[in-house]
Image (spheres, rainbow, N blue to C red):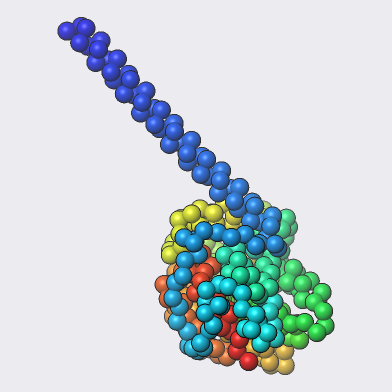
Amino acid sequence: MGNRFICMSKKETKDNGSRSKRMNRSQRKLLADEEFLHRQALSMALHQHQLSQRFDGSMSRRIGSTSSRRHSLPDSVTNGKQAPEFLENLKTKKFVLIHGEGFGAWCWYKTISLLEETGLVPTALDLVGSGIDLTDTNAVATLAEYSKTLINYLQNLPEDEKVILVGHSSGGACVSYAMEHFPQKISKAIFLCATMVSDGQRPFDVFAEELGSAEQFMQESKFLIHGNGKDQPPTGFMFEKEQMKGLYFNQSPTKDIALAMVSMRSIPLGPIMEKLSLTPENYGTGRRFFIQTLDDHALSPDIQEKLVRENPPEGVFKIKGSDHCPFFSKPQSLHKILVEIAQIP
């Protein structure tokens, strides 16, 4: 019986050793996967102004979209191939992509690839304190400071050139600011589930129905950051990872969510609490388009409809089944709509 006990102990020891080896292999794989995601995020950030990388078909599969305007696009456009005849008819081929709160230029990598394949010229910018811009987020107090990268870009454009601006989420406030100060540089402005505010509104007001009043948020939110000390007003905020996943990425691929989680940064509070001054002479003369995301948890379809009613754009487009990050969940649909808007005379 003693021998049997000894034999069983050896077997159990062997089994435990096998399990331990399997666990170690599993842990090593998880660490390797995480390290790969970090490297991928860093690579995208470092090459954000030259993003011509190509990704496998599973990451940019074709998904249908709907829009309030229906134009017949050439097959060469919808298939992501160059279309010389189509491009010849476009007055503006340059797209400037402005990310939303917490994101950076990195988040547009799929959209950039698709636009480049079509023969268009996209540029994604890091707002100040975002992406790989090294500015301390807590030091960004105004919308002008936050938008400085975009302002510099527009100031340096040749006099005879215009661009199509695309702003996502709170980045819409930067687009509105640019329309007010550089109307002659902007051919069209596209608000992608964005804060398309009216004169005298704050970007935060758009999210107030979900987050509560600004005063309540400033007093009670557990996501606030006090960069100048606890006894000073908050300077920024950042949701926890689980909140971000539920708010922003409810339809996005798992690998893209993991990539975003290692790339998101805190959000400066000052710019989204600032009231915009928009005039009929500048902002009011710009051509605005709005893209609705119909499965959005951060900016609900009802609120997006309200924005459109209160500040009517020239055209409204919709992406079915899209979360707050359509460049992750529906890149082909977004690309098709952007090309469609570019074609509108």
Q: In x, y percent, where is residue 77?
A: 56, 78
Tag count: 0
Confirm whether residue 237 shows in the render: no
Where on the picture, by quarter, is residue 25?
A: top left
The answer to whether 18 is drawn above or below residue 336 in the figure is above
Q: Is residue 144 above or below residue 90?
A: above
Instruction: Identify the image quadrant of residue 2.
Output: top left
Instruction: Name the residue at 29% across, 15% down.
Output: 10
Task: Residue 119: give x, y in percent of width and height.
Answer: 65, 74
Tell me which residue sits at (69%, 67%) in the image: 125
Quadrant for the N terminus, please. top left
Query: Which residue is situated farthest in the top direction here?
Result: 2
Q: In the visual, does 243 lie left or right of 282?
A: left
Residue visible at 57% across and 51% down in the picture: 262
Q: Along the line of sight, which residue is nearer the eye, 203 or 118?
A: 118
**Residue 19 visible in the snapshot:** yes
Q: Quadrant of residue 9?
A: top left
Question: Residue 297's x, y, as percent?
Answer: 44, 69
Which residue is rendered at x = 66% and y = 56% of the image? 45
- In this picture, residue 296 sits left or right of residue 187: left
Q: Nearer the viewer, residue 264 or 25?
A: 25
Residue situated furthest left in the rendering: 1
Whether residue 72 sits left or right of residue 272 in the image: it is left
Q: Position of residue 333 (x, y in %)?
A: 49, 74
Please state, as top left, top right, bottom left or bottom right, where the C terminus lies in the image: bottom right
